[in-house]
Image (cartoon, rainbow, N blue to C red):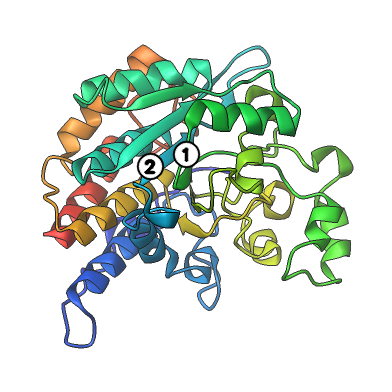
Amino acid sequence: MELSHAPTLCTPPPLLTESAFMPRLDNCLEQLRLICQVDPGNRGLALPVERNAFSERSGDLAKAAKALCSPGADGHKTRVGIVTGFHVPIDEHYGAFETDGPLGTIFLARALLQVGIEPVLFGESPLLVALEAGLNKARIGGKVRLIEYPRDAFESGFYIRRFHITSGRLTHLVAIERPGPSHSLATLRCRPDYLPEWDLDFKKVAPPITRDRYLTMAGIDVTHQHSQIHWVFEQPSPHGPRQTIGVGDGGNEIGMGAIAWDLVNANISLGGRIHCRIPTDSIVVAGVSNWGAYALAGGVLAIHEATHLELFDPQKEHDILAAMVTQGNLVDGRTLESDTTVDGLGWDIHAQVLDRMAKALG
C-alpha cells in the first residue's frame, strides 16, 4: 500500500476544552486518544465513520491506563511485562525488526519507572541489543530488566513454563506492535461475536496456508522469525490474575483479536487474512503503535499527576531512536531503511504528536 499523508495529519482534531461535564482526568485521557487515533497511512482504521477500529474500543485507552495504575491481585506490587518487536523481511535472505514498537516500549518503561512501577522488557536476542541501546540512551540502563524470548521453543507448555520461571510474577502484560497468529476457521468460529455468514468470506480471503500464522500487512509469513510469545497471552498465569493490554495499528498485532473480524476484514487491506486472533483486556488502536504507547504512558502520568516534560521532548526521543537504529539495526517498517523514521513518516510528524500530547497533559 502506497504511503499517503492523510489531510487529518496536518489538521489534527483540536484539543478538547475542559467542561463541567467531563472531569479533568477523563478530559486529558480523551485528548490523548484523539491525538494518537489519526490514520496517516490510510490503512482504514478510521473508516467507515459510523463504526471503525478507532471507535470500536474507544474507551480502552483510559481503561488500560487505569489498569496499569492499579495493584495486582491480592495487593501485589505492580510489575509490568512489555513485549514488542515486529520482524519484517527486507529481501529473501535478510530481515530486521522495525522502529515502530521498540521506541514506544522504551517510552512506556520510562513513564512506569517515574511513577514507581517496575517494567520488564522481553525480546528476541537481536532486538535486545536495540532495547538495551534505547535504555542506555534514556539513562535508565541497568534499571530495567531485559529477558530474551526462547526462539527455539515451539511447544506451548514448555514455552509458558520457561516464560514464567524467567519473568516471575507479572501483574500486567503489554504487547506493543507485536505480531500474533491469524485466525483458522476453528478459532474464528470460537469467537463470542462469531456469525455463520463469516465462514464464506473467511474462506475467500484466507487460503489455508495463511491461517494460524504471523503475517505482515502485505500478508507475508514471518512466523519463524518470531518467538511464540502469544502463548503467554492465551494462557492464565500460574501466579494469579493479570491484566493484558495490546497496542497496534494494523490489525495483525496481539490484542487486535478484541476487534471484530468482520470490521477488520471490511476496512483494512487483507484484514480478514492477517487479523490477529489474540484479544487483550484492553486494546489501544493508534495510527502508529508508538503513538499508542505515548498516549498510554501519558495516561499513566496523568493519573499519578506526575511531570511529563522530560518524556515528551521530541529531540530526546529522536536521539533514543537514533541510538536504537545505529546500535540495534532497526529499520523503518515501510521504507525498510535504517533511518530515524517510523512507518514511513519523517520525524517532524512524530515530534508534532509528542508536542500535542505534552500540551494535553499540561
Residue at position x 26%, y 72% in the image: 26
- Tag in front: 1 or 2: 1
Residue at position x 44%, y 19% in the image: 128
x%, y% of residue 107? 29, 38
3D distance between C-alphas at marks 1 and 2: 7 Å
Given residues 139 and 217, the one toward you in this image is 139
Given residues 303 and 47, the one toward you in this image is 303
x%, y% of residue 88? 57, 27
Q: Residue furthest bottom?
A: 21
x%, y% of residue 125? 51, 16
Q: Which mark is residue 79?
A: 2
Given residues 293 and 155, the one toward you in this image is 155
x%, y% of residue 305? 14, 58
Residue type, label 1? Arg
Residue at position x 79%, y 58% in the image: 188
- Residue 86 relative to residue 82: left or right: right
Tell me how many marks there are: 2
Q: Height in image: 124 above or below 349? A: above
Circle 1 sits on which residue?
Answer: 169
Q: Which mark is residue 273?
A: none
Q: Residue furthest front?
A: 74
Residue type, label 2? Arg
- Residue 167 relative to residue 131: left or right: right
Quadrant of the drawing holding the C terminus: bottom left
Under circle 2, the secondary element is strand
Q: Mark 1 vs mark 2: which is more N-terminal?
A: 2
- Residue 215 relative to residue 175: left or right: right
Q: Are marks 1 and 2 in contact (CB under 8 Å)?
A: yes
